Amino acid sequence: MKVSDVMVTNPVMVAMNAPCGRLALLMRDKGIDSVIVVDAGKPVGIVTERDLVHRIMAENKNPDSCSANDVSSKPVVAITVHADVDLAVDMMNEYKIRRLVVVDDSDTVVGILTTDDLARNLREMSEELAVKYTILSRRDG
């Protein structure tokens, strides 16, 4: 199964200079827990609810006086839209993250893949693995 089969397309993206207060409103209004920070369509960071809590609220900073670039997690861990889901899971485990930015061949953001997306598609992925295993076991027999 490919990343393109399970990713969310049209992720919410913001400019580097977007005020953090706006990010919180976007997340609330869209029902999401992260936004991708971009510069000319290329990912430069990601801001999560946790980033807002730890880097703004816990520090008593004014959310309108800091930008997405100030609080975003960097560098962005990205994966190509053509990659296998297995690789995505390995990357999430290696980097200890729950989100991967998905890019096309030009490194332009085309989606986001989260552990929630993987969980929603677990049954289909399990069935695909079962079919692959069955095919492989028949070859060995």
Image (tube, rainbow, N blue to C red):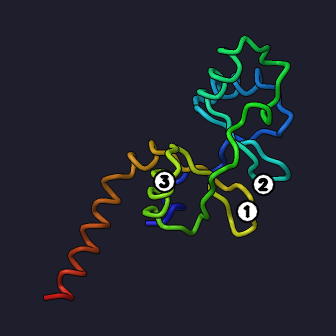
Q: Residues within 10 Å of mark 3 (few under 14, many from 20)?
A: few
Task: Say which quarter of the image contains residue 124.
Answer: bottom left
Q: Quadrant of the N terminus?
A: bottom left
31 displayed left or right of 90: right
For residue 90, above or below residue 53: below
Residue position marked by numbered label 1 in the rendering: 107
Q: Secondary structure at mark 3?
A: helix
Q: Are marks 2 and 3 in contact (CB under 8 Å)?
A: no
Q: Position of residue 87 (x, y in %)?
A: 47, 63
Residue position marked by numbered label 2 in the rendering: 42
Q: Secondary structure at mark 2?
A: strand
111 and 49: which one is in front? 49
93 and 29: which one is in front? 93
Task: Give the mark, 2 or 3, whose residue is nearer the N terminus.
Answer: 2
Q: Which mark is on residue 46? A: none
Q: Are marks 1 and 2 in contact (CB under 8 Å)?
A: yes
Q: Which mark's residue is nearer the viewer, 1 or 3?
A: 3
Cα distance between the residues tagged 2 and 3: 23 Å
Q: Position of residue 31 (x, y in %)?
A: 58, 29
